[in-house]
Amino acid sequence: MNPSNGKTIAEVPCATKADVSAAVEAADRALPRWWERAPRDRAEVLRAAYELMVAEHDVIASIMRLEMGKTAADAHAEVRYAAEFFRWFSEETVRVGGSLRRAPSGNNTILTVHRPVGVSLLLTPWNFPAAMATRKIAPALAAGCTMVLKPAEDTPLTALYLADLLGRAGAPEGVVSVLPTDRPAEFVEWALGDGRVRKLSFTGSTPVGRRLVAKSADRIVNCSLELGGNAPFIVLDDADLEAAVDGAMFAKMRNGGQACTAANRFLVHTAVKHEFTERLTERMAALELGPATDDTTKLGPVINAKRQYDIADRVTEAIADGAVVHTGGAPVEGPGCYFPATVLGEVDRECRLATEETFGPVAPIIEVADENDAVRLANATEMGLAAYVYSGNLGRALSVGQRLECGMVGVNRGAISDPAAPFGGMKQSGLGREGGFEGINEYLETTYLAAHW
């Protein structure tokens, strides 16, 4: 469904249990051949996939604009970002190492080597349908794994296109299968119940992640989970406010606020709260709301009507608790799933906008007395994915950043995602890391050999 107008774009098959079994069978059959291929050969497939994504940039961006509602700027940025995972892991493919050292006893040599974990089940979300797929596919292919990917039911078309692209890049039959479904629970039950599946990588909500961990425990399946966030955006009294507002616009409004790393609550020092609020309100109010297919649109629709009205409920609750609307505040009626850029001041620390992740274009501003107050409030959550800190003193910003219980911190910048950096969280925001040097390790097992010669 196109969230810009509510119309059907296309119909795709819904995978059956037989389809899942066939895909796992194909992946298992292809695994030895793919793993045994020279690392350089696997790297060349990934590099070819990168080149194809760059060449077909406009097509992929157009698909995402239709099925997810991304603006032109966001869609093109995502294609560039997504392609980089293929390039980065093409370079890491040939660098999978091992170790050789003498045992402390002197009686033997300790030799370690790495092998692929095996057939992998990849579950991707709707908000970044290209990047969340390539961030999993690329390291899995680099490590020598084969896979079955289930895209989110809202955005299957991008993943299906990527499957075709990978085939044209040289990925052998059975190495990458994409199966859409609108019955995700049954799909996962079927896949994880198959003894040939040895790896689960999931990006999505924490409640679903908990259920997947429980299910994967039945067979002790290796898990990587990138789950929900509740990112604080801390603005200290000595912050450069122009830079802070620039960073806030990216951290909050990238992808229309529909990102796990999105700034979810703005913790602003008393001394600068008024000026920061005014500046942010001016920038947010200027965002032109409209169809994602219109090149002039600065803010497209949210993914679906359910999301639209969930955002509205949270805003209404916050207003009832005393929040002040500076701009936006209510869904747009009519065809399409629109919610305007919204800034709320005087937000209660205990309301849902402050305590739960809100996937949408809403910026709740909470006043803090000092940096200790900001850190306490920032850490008062079960989530720990991303955070942002703005201060005119770099040492102070770094000090505050290291006190935050999260996996990633933007220090005087609103952009943190990078294929070359480890992406992931702590606490209930997940397990493991994607991207960076660490990303390929999620798809490798270590074998230790005690050798004597």
Image (cartoon, helix red, strand yellow):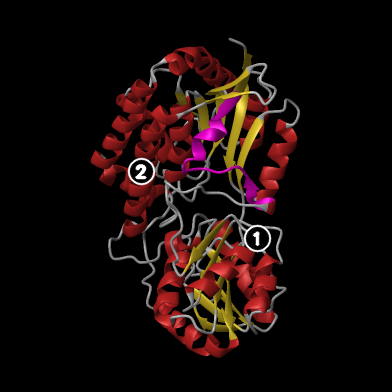
Against 257, residue 55 (above or below) is above
- Residue 327 visible in the snapshot: yes
Tell me, yes or no, whether the highlighted magenta stretch contains residue 439. Answer: yes
Q: Is residue 330 visible?
A: no
Residue underneath mark 2 = 84
Q: Residue placed farthest to the left in the image?
A: 55
Residue shown at 61% from the left, 73% from the top: 315
Three-letter code for the amino acid on which mark 1 is drawn: Glu
**Which residue is tagged 1?**
405
Please report contact status of discs 1 and 2: CB closer than 8 Å, yes or no. Answer: no
Q: Position of residue 135 (x, y in %)?
A: 46, 40
Give the percent coordinates (x, y) of residue 314. Answer: 64, 69
Q: 402 or 191, which is in the foreground?
A: 402
Measured as percent of width and height from the top left, residue 359 is found at: 55, 60
Residue 284, quarter of picture: bottom left
Q: Quadrant of the C terminus?
A: top right
User: In which image quadrant can residue 10 be found?
Assistant: top left
Rendered view: 150 above or below 118:
below
Residues in magenta, as a range = 428-446
Name the residue: 67% across, 57% down. 383
- Secondary element at tag 1: loop
Q: Nearer the viewer, residue 401 or 6?
A: 401
Q: Is residue 166 magenta?
A: no
